[in-house]
Image (cartoon, rainbow, N blue to C red):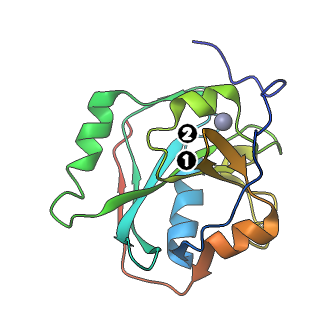
Amino acid sequence: MRDEDFTFRRGPATAYRPSGAVLSLPVNALEATLGLLQRSGRRESCVFWYGTRDRETGLSAVRAVLAPVQTMRPGNYAVSAAAMSQMVTLVTAEDWKPLAQIHSHPGKGVRHSAYDDEMASSRRALSIVFPFYGHWHGRWPTGVGVHEHQNDYWHTLLNQDAARRVEVVEKAPLLIKDLRR
Ligand SMILES: [Zn+2]
């Protein structure tokens, strides 16, 4: 399997348009996510956020931080359909929805690669990339790649758009599971 290639990717045909939808990210969900990404060492890894979503208001809230069984390598990661199904069984009882797919990159580059476009499991969820294998700290969302799919393109949001789209909020009860071996 090839490594992620960050050199070439076509640009968007249309500019990003904020929808007004807001994802609430409890600060402890952010911390748990970074911890899970860091645990894979010098390998890329992915984590998923599940939670509530209100279609009418466009408001959603992270309630679960889940790391599925996956292959982790220095230059890419992969999750099988079976591993996705196994992970989803953890949240079906609550009827939580997939809200974001999160993964790490080796360096400071956090834009989607063409590989990321292919690996995104849901175009209705956000796709978020953390630099330095999850060793990120700073002021959200500076240095983090927040992507939203619109008009057949994964847009990398500008900081101001990303800050409105994903709001870090106070600590909340969470389900945190690491299914990796
Ligand atoms: Zn990537």
Could you tell me the amino acid type at mark 1? Arg
What x and y, as percent, mark residue 97? 33, 60
Q: Quadrant of the C terminus?
A: top left
Please report the residue visible at 80 percent of the width from the left and 61 percent of the height from the top.
158
User: Looking at the picture, does residue 43 appear above or below residue 150?
Assistant: above
In the image, taking residue 12 as reference, residue 38 lies left or right, namely: left
Q: Are marks 1 and 2 in contact (CB under 8 Å)?
A: yes
Label 2: state its secondary structure: loop
- For label 1, the residue is 39
Please report the residue visible at 72 percent of the width from the left and 54 percent of the height from the top.
135
User: Looking at the picture, does residue 20 appear above or below residue 148?
Assistant: below
Observer-nearest residue: 84 or 112?
112
Could you tell me the amino acid type at mark 2? Ser
Q: How many other residues sit within 10 Å of disc 2, few (<14), some (14-19) or many (≥20)?
A: many
In the image, taking residue 121 as reference, residue 84 lies left or right, namely: left
What x and y, as percent, mark residue 164? 68, 75
- For label 2, the residue is 45
Q: Confirm whether residue 74 shows in the render.
A: no
The quarter of the image that holds ligand 1 is: top right
Label 1: state its secondary structure: loop
Q: How many other residues sit within 10 Å of disc 1, few (<14), some (14-19) or many (≥20)?
A: few
First in residue order: circle 1 vs circle 2: 1
Q: Quadrant of the N terminus?
A: top right
Please report the residue visible at 39 percent of the width from the left and 76 percent of the height from the top.
56
